[in-house]
Amino acid sequence: MKYESQRVALPFFAVAMALFVLQVVFGILAATVYVLPEFLAEAMPFHIMRMSHTNLLIVWLLIGFMGSTYYLLPEEAEQDIHSPLLAYLGLAIFAVAGAGALLSYQFGIHEGREFLEQPLWCKVLITVSFLMFLYNTTRTLLAGRKTAINLVLMLGLWLAAVFWLFAFYNPSNLSLDKLYWWWIVHVWVEGVWELIMASLLAYLLIKMTGVDREVIEKWLYVIIGLALFSGLLGTGHHYYWIGTPGYWQPLGSIFSTLEVAPFFAMVMFAFYMFWKGRRNHPNKSAMLWTLGSATVAFFGAGVWGFMHTLSFVNYYSHGTQVTAAHGHLAFYGAYVMMVLAIITYAMPQLRRMQPYNQILNMWSFWMMTSAMCFMTFTLTFAGVVQTHMQRVMGINYMEVQAQLGLFYAMRLGAGAVVAVAALLYLYAVFGPAREQLPATSQTALGTT
């Protein structure tokens, strides 16, 4: 660790991981309802569990992105963070907004729009906190060195803030509401967040492979070009059945098919750089999470997204468990694993320790990833059965759900394994370490 202000990232990582655990807990509660429909029906209805689960995912990933930015930006800009105090204040505001929204949901206080259920005051606090973060990081960038990594990262973060503003626009017309709603939900996760992911991936590969920055930056420009081109226009695959004109069916099908390209490019990018560079970096677990993120993102976001993105397929599969299968593996591969990779890489340096508990960390990787893949397969099979029985044969929805019990039980079991793996990861990263890193080699772990 070269700059003392990089330690600002530590509380961001800690808060993000605490919310990660809460997200997994609410996910297991929601999965239990699929197996035992009356479970906590009076105390906490299913829609509250699901709302809490999805909102916690978004909140902790955003906090993870902030922590990652505060960690890598000083090294990339060769400049300390403009104001560490402002960073801590922004985190406190964001945490209050997230906790306030979560508590509000338990009392039935929400706006009802999926993923954007936060009460208005929470949305305002989130906006204020994120603008403070952008001001702090932009001032840091402007005062220091500009690289492809920090420029692409800041572009992604600023665009995320711009599209978030549509959360405040809630038209009464349902078709219009869904049109602009996708400008946040889709453009975030299948557009500007891909810029954030790609820049974090490039940073880790530079630090852990030793490949020349110029080579990695050329790949980065290709990836973000593909992501913006396909992601922005690919929004059309969400316009099929919400009252928009029919021309969105061929447009959405064509451009959303191209969304596979940036994720495939990331896989090629990651493994080519790993093959091209040195492979003896001491933090083996960080490299495992990095390569795993690119790979699982390709299958979850790319392949599983393609499976039901064409309009004539989506006509039958829309809103079934196929969507849930895609959503779980895509979010896990593209964003959850990338944040876990950054934390795995950064924590030994933030704690001034040698890379520690790597075997436990790798066990966590394989357990969590295997369980998420198993969950995806079971939900995919459930979705195929559901699509045929419900959309083709015309069987009643609840009768179909009764036939899917085995798949839901297997999904619950997979969720329990994810929970165990998450706890194992937290112990591996935040638990006791072997030895303190000597002062003369505190930068040796990641600098090239």
Image (cartoon, rainbow, N blue to C red):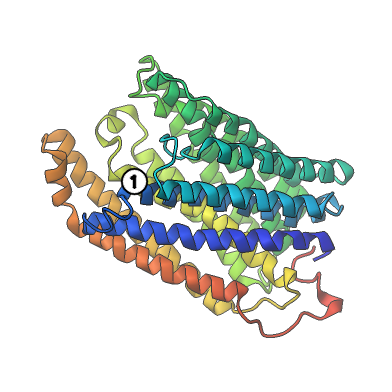
In the image: residue 47, left or right of residue 140: left
Q: Is residue 221 visible?
A: no
Q: How many marks?
A: 1
Q: Nearer the viewer, residue 87 or 346?
A: 87
Q: Considering only vertical position in the picture, is 238 above or below 47?
A: above
In the image: residue 255, left or right of residue 30: right
Q: Considering only vertical position in the picture, is 360 above or below 108?
A: below
Could you tell me which residue is drawn at 63 percent across and 45 percent down? 196
Image quarter (top left, top right, bottom left or bottom right) of the C terminus? bottom right
Residue 129 spot, x, y in % from top left:
68, 43
Q: Is residue 23 visible?
A: yes
Residue 232 spot, x, y in % from top left:
54, 29
Q: Tell which residue pokes out farthest to the bottom in this image.
A: 434
Image quarter (top left, top right, bottom left or bottom right) of the N terminus? bottom right
Residue 334 spot, x, y in % from top left:
52, 50
Could you tell me which residue is drawn at 66 percent across and 68 percent down? 279
**Secondary structure at numbered mark 1:** helix
User: Where is mark 1, residue-wise?
Assistant: 47
In the image: residue 363, left or right of residue 13: left
Q: Considering only vertical position in the picture, is 123 above or below 97?
A: above
Neighbor class of circle 1 (other Cα within 10 Å; few <14, some 14-19, many 20+) is: few
Q: Nearer the viewer, residue 129 or 443?
A: 129
Q: Tell which residue pokes out farthest to the front in this image.
A: 107
Residue 283 spot, x, y in % from top left:
65, 71
Could you tell me which residue is drawn at 73 percent across and 42 percent down? 132
**Residue 74, picture quadrant:** bottom right
Amino acid type at circle 1 is: His
Could you tell me which residue is drawn at 40 percent across and 24 percent down? 239
In the image: residue 203, left or right of residue 81: left
Q: Nearer the viewer, residue 24 or 296?
A: 24
